Image (tube, coloured by chain):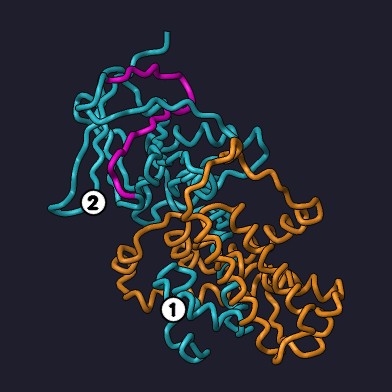
Amino acid sequence: MTHQQAVDKQAVERYLLDEMPEIERFAFEEHLFDCDICADDVRSGALMREGVEAGFLPAAATTVVGPAASGLDAFAAKAAVTGETSPHADVTARAGAGWRSALPWAVAAALAIAAGYQSLWVVPELRARVVGPSVLSPVTLRGASRGTEPTLTRPTTGVISLAVDLTGVAAGARLTYDLRAADGRSVASGTAAAPPPGTPLLLLIPASDLDSTGRYVLAIVTGDGPGSASVDYRFTIESEK
Amino acid sequence: MQLQRFEFDQAYIDRLVAADPETEGHFVRYFADLLTLKLRSRLRSPTLVEDARQETFRRVLTTLKEKGGLTSAGSLGAFVNSVCNNVLFECYRAGAKVQQLAEDHDQTDDRRPSAEMGVMAAEQRDRVRHALAGLPEKEQEILRWLFFEERDKDEICRELKVDRNYLRVLVHRAKAKFRDRFLEAEA
């Protein structure tokens, strides 16, 4: 690959966006290691990407409404203790910006069992909120047809963590989740990418948002369109004694 | 991470062959990031990436010293890349064999960067924050969608009413601005 071909093919951007087939990736790397211009371009792009992945962007122009605020309070309190700035510290000052305004209080993540890069598979929304080390003791949810329904005790503060067993779902598959109370009220919903095989999807829900005891159903839909599949995960919430 | 362009010449190769510490340091800094990017997409763990990177450096420097240099100084990058490919394929072959896992196979890698590297990393983090904060809000949003929220790129294109090519153009522009601001912070 020549430099002009690399430019014409937007090779640097496609390399950074993981859009290159393997053969082309090798071909571009042959050029990359030889071309100080492309090398410099890839380095700066990789640095930018890593900075964004690490959550170094300023807080998003979003508004947190309703239950979201209470959900973030726990994290904000933790940020105060750790001395770190909450990435959402200025959210209320930037009202009315964009479709994401009501979204991000439901936090999804998957704890990976595999070593290496998969040691912690974090759905992006989580990165913005975990401001320090935390220990989670999730309750495992299995499909409605597989075993008994777990019962969780609702803490007065903090979050409830659910580890959802997604056996048979391909890594990276698009998931849509919707948690509903017994009366049909939606408590949390959103999308996430499926974690690697053998790894549960972790869903963190502010305890304050599970404001009633009783049964809940978490519906997870895999894929879009006619080929999509839905699995229900049921559990019961009881009050702290 | 090094963001300065550099062209290799015969004098540079000679210094590498002579094991000049400063040149060796520059050589490692120059290629470390490129090798990491190359290996990270193909090897499953940071330990393997680091091992393959170190092995690449070792083989390149050893070969240069044994052969007394390269026929063309300009081919140093291609040589590093081809050595890395060999190391990578050996890793693949080794990984394909059935092996008994060691008792500590699932332990975290306890190698840590030196304190100096930690400080440098902290300085770099501040510069990255500064550079990202200086980007226009729309570009910040696109980067957030792509790399933080990892949203589907087609979905992003639909929302922005652009095609994939133009999305790359937007990333290219953001990258250029980021680079300028990053280097500003250095100055």
Query: How far across and how far down the image is residue A162, in percent?
Result: 38, 30
Q: Colour of chain A?
A: cyan
Q: Is residue B32 above or below residue B122?
A: below
Query: Residue, x 41% and y 38% (percent of image)?
Result: A68
Q: Chain of mark 1?
A: B
Q: Which mark is residue A223?
A: 2
Q: Colour of chain B?
A: orange
Frontmost residue, B134 versus A11: A11
* Residue B169: numbered disc: 1
Q: The C terminus of chain A appears in which quarter of the rendering?
A: top left
Residue A209: image quadrant is: top left
Q: Quadrant of residue A84?
A: top right
Q: Are marks 1 and 2 on the same chain?
A: no
Inspect the image, locate mark 1, and give the three-letter code of the amino acid beneath it: Val
**Residue visible at 51% across and 33% down?**
A73
Q: Is residue A133 above or below residue A194?
A: above
Residue under the image location 59 percent in, 67 percent down: B87
Q: Residues within 10 Å of mark 1 (few under 14, many from 20)?
A: some
